Image (cartoon, grey):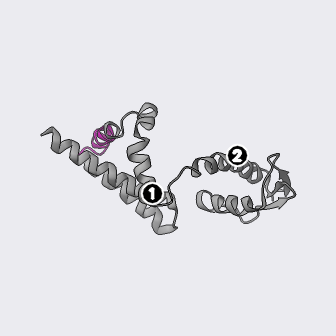
Amino acid sequence: MNELIGLQTILPVKEQDLVLFTEFLNEFYTLPSDVSVTPQGDQFLIEGSTADAYAIGYAFAEWKCWKKSMARVPANILEHSNEIVFKRGEEKARQYGPFHDSMVKTAKIASLMCDKDISTNDCYNVMVALKLARESYAHKYDNLLDAISYLAQKNNSIELERNAE
């Protein structure tokens, strides 16, 4: 049995941030039942096994970055997807290469692995299906955002192919 310990972050926190941080944890992490996160003055007290408490501490640092990025996120999921697919596409292309080119390569690699022809369109469909399958277990904003974004990218791919003909 793991010994319970308490870790305190050194980052100041506001009362309303406890709710936001708890929502973040529930959205992106599965908390073990023995872990608790409670405000303690201007800090969070994280209690649980050593590994869990350190993981939650890491999640808190990740949340601080996420919170800053979410301040720029549109309130509507379609606008958010538009922001990702059309407005930040250049930023992601510098980091990962053009999205469409990656999906073409994905289709070629999957075709070799499965020893049958898998199209780029198939890859988009699988990615959307994966996000919807995950959503069937538990609602996560990110699942729906990604599914919408893959559909938008799929449409771009179809248009690219039509314009190339």
- Going by the numbered disc 2, the residue's amino acid type is Ala
Residue sitting farthest toward the right: 41
- Say if residue 118 shows up in the picture: no
Image point 29% across, 42% down: which residue? 107
Q: Which residues are magenta?
A: 103-119
- Mark 1 burial class by Cα count in 10 Å: few <14, some 14-19, many 20+: some
Task: Give how far across and how far down residue 12 sits, in percent.
Answer: 81, 49
Amino acid type of the residue that numbered disc 1 sits on in the rendered structure: Leu
Q: Is residue 142 magenta?
A: no
> Relative to residue 65, is residue 15 depicted above or below?
below
Q: How far across and how far down the image is residue 81, in percent? A: 42, 53
- Binning the other alpha carbons within 10 Å of mark 2 as few (below 14), some (14 to 19) or many (20 upward) gives few
User: How many marks are shown on the rendered structure?
Assistant: 2
**In what element is the residue under mark 2?**
helix
Does the magenta-highlighted stretch encompass residue 115? yes
The numbered dot on residue 61 is 2
| Residue occupying the far left of the picture | 165
Instruction: Tell me which corner region of the image, top left, top right, bottom left or bottom right, holds residue 145.
Output: bottom left
- Quadrant in which the N terminus appears: bottom right
Q: Which mark is residue 145?
A: 1
Could you tell me what secondary structure mostly forms the magenta stretch? Answer: helix
> How far is mark 1 from mark 2, CA to CA?
23 Å
Q: Could you say where residue 32 lies in the image, as x and y percent from the top left? A: 70, 62
Q: Earlier in the sequence, mark 1 or mark 2?
A: 2
Kindly indicate whether the residue at mark 2 contacts the one at mark 1 (C-beta within 8 angstroms): no
Residue at x 43%, y 55% (from the top left corner)? 79
Q: Secondary structure at mark 1?
A: helix
Question: Which residue ends up furthest to the top in the rendered image?
Answer: 94
Residue 45 at x, y = what percent? 83, 56
Name the side, left or right, on which 158 lies relative to 146.
Answer: left
Q: Is residue 159 above or below residue 37?
A: above
Identify the residue at image location x=82%, y=45%. 10
